[in-house]
Image (cartoon, rainbow, N blue to C red):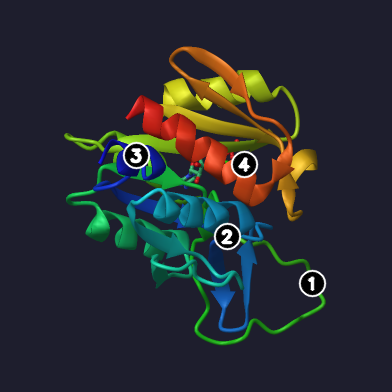
C-alpha cells in the first residue's frame, strides 16, 4: 500500500486543467488567438493521470491527442473555457491553468464575413475574465497552479502573478525556452521560493511539476 501511494502520489485526487490557446471569433471565418501548441498542458495532464489523479482537461483548439484516462472537454473561446471550468469545479482538489487564454476578445463577432473596403479597419476589444484568478478567489478554492510564460524578468513576473492571483504554485518559463518546442526549462515558484527544474522534454518536466505539486498538497 505504501509503495502504491509513492508510485501514485495523486491517487484519489481530482484535477481540473486548462490547456491550449483560446480563439476569439471576429466573424464566421476569422478570429484572434494566442500561439500555443498545447504540448505542455497535455503532457501535464498525462503526468497527473499517471500519478493516479482523475483528470478533466478543458482544451482550447489544438491538435494534441487526448492522454489515456483523461476526460477532455473541447472549447473555443475564453468565455466558453471559463464556463466549462466553473461547471466542472465542484469537487475538484486541484486546478492547473496552462491555457494561453486570449486576454481580450472582439466586442462583437460579426454574423457575416467582414468585407474589405480598402479603408482602415479598427477592431474594438474588451477584456476576457481571468479564469485562474476567478477560481482562486472562490470561497473554497482548490489548490491553484498557474503558468507564467514571460519574455524577460521571469522571477519578478512569475512571483508577482503568484501573489496577485493568490496561487499556491506558479510554473514559470521564458518563452524562448519552451514555446512550441518539445523541450522546456521551468522554475517553480511557491511560498518557499524558487525551484528550478532541469531542462528536459516536456513529459519529464511535467512529471517534475507533479512530484513538486504532490509534496505541497
Ligand atoms: N489565465 C487565465 N485566464 C486568463 C488569463 C490567464 O486562467 N484570462 C491563466 C493562465 O492560464 C496562466 C496564468 O493565468 O496560468 C498566467 O497567464 P499569463 O497570460 O501569463 O498572465 P496574465 O495574468 O494574463 O498577465 P499578462 O498576460 O499581462 O502577462
Ligand atoms: Ca495573458
Give the residue at x 45% y 59%. Answer: 78
x, y percentage for residue 121? 72, 67
User: Looking at the image, is mark 1 or mark 4 nearer the viewer?
Assistant: 4
* Disc 1 and disc 3 in contact, CB within 8 angstroms: no
Q: Which residue is mark 3?
A: 3
- Looking at this rendering, what residue extends furthest in the top direction? 192
Q: Which residue is mark 1?
A: 119
- Looking at this rendering, what residue extends furthest in the bottom direction? 112
- Give left or right: position of 168 versus 194: left
* Disc 4 and disc 3 in contact, CB within 8 angstroms: no
Callout 2: SS: loop
**Above or below 159: residue 192:** above
Q: Which residue is mark 2?
A: 21
Residue 41 visible, this angle = yes
User: How far, Cα to Cα, is label 3 from label 2?
Assistant: 38 Å
User: How far, Cα to Cα, is label 1 from label 4?
Assistant: 48 Å
**Above or below 184: residue 46:** below
Callout 1: SS: loop
**Among the 4 quarters of the image, the one containing residue 196:** top right
User: How far, Cα to Cα, is label 4 from label 3?
Assistant: 23 Å
Q: Which mark is residue 205?
A: 4
**Among the 4 quarters of the image, the one containing residue 174:** top right
Disc on the earlier residue, 1 or 3: 3
Amino acid at each position: 500500500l505504501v509503495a502504491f501511494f509513492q508510485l501514485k502520489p495523486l491517487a484519489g485526487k481530482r484535477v481540473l486543467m486548462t490547456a491550449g490557446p483560446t480563439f476569439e471569433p471576429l466573424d464566421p471565418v476569422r478570429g484572434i488567438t494566442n500561439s500555443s501548441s498545447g504540448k505542455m498542458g497535455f503532457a501535464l495532464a498525462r503526468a497527473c493521470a499517471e500519478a493516479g489523479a482523475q483528470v478533466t482537461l478543458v482544451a482550447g483548439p489544438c491538435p494534441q491527442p487526448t492522454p489515456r484516462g483523461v476526460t477532455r472537454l473541447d472549447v473555443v473561446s475564453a468565455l466558453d473555457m471559463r464556463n466549462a471550468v466553473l461547471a466542472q469545479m465542484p469537487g475538484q482538489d486541484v486546478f492547473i491553468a496552462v491555457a494561453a487564454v486570449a486576454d481580450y476578445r472582439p466586442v462583437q463577432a460579426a454574423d457575416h464575413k467582414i468585407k474589405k473596403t480598402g479603408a482602415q479597419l479598427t477592431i474594438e476589444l474588451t477584456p476576457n475574465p481571468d479564469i485562474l484568478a476567478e477560481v482562486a478567489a472562490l470561497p473554497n478554492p482548490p489548490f491553484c497552479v498557474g503558468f507564467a510564460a514571460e519574455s524577460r524578468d521571469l522571477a519578478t513576473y512569475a512571483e508577482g502573478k503568484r501573489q496577485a492571483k493568490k496561487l499556491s504554485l506558479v510554473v514559470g518559463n521564458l518563452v524562448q525556452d519552451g514555446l512550441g518546442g518539445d523541450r522546456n526549462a521551468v522554475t517553480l515558484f511557491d511560498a518557499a521560493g524558487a525551484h528550478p527544474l532541469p531542462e528536459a522534454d516536456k513529459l519529464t518536466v511535467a512529471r517534475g511539476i507533479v512530484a513538486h505539486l504532490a509534496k505541497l498538497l
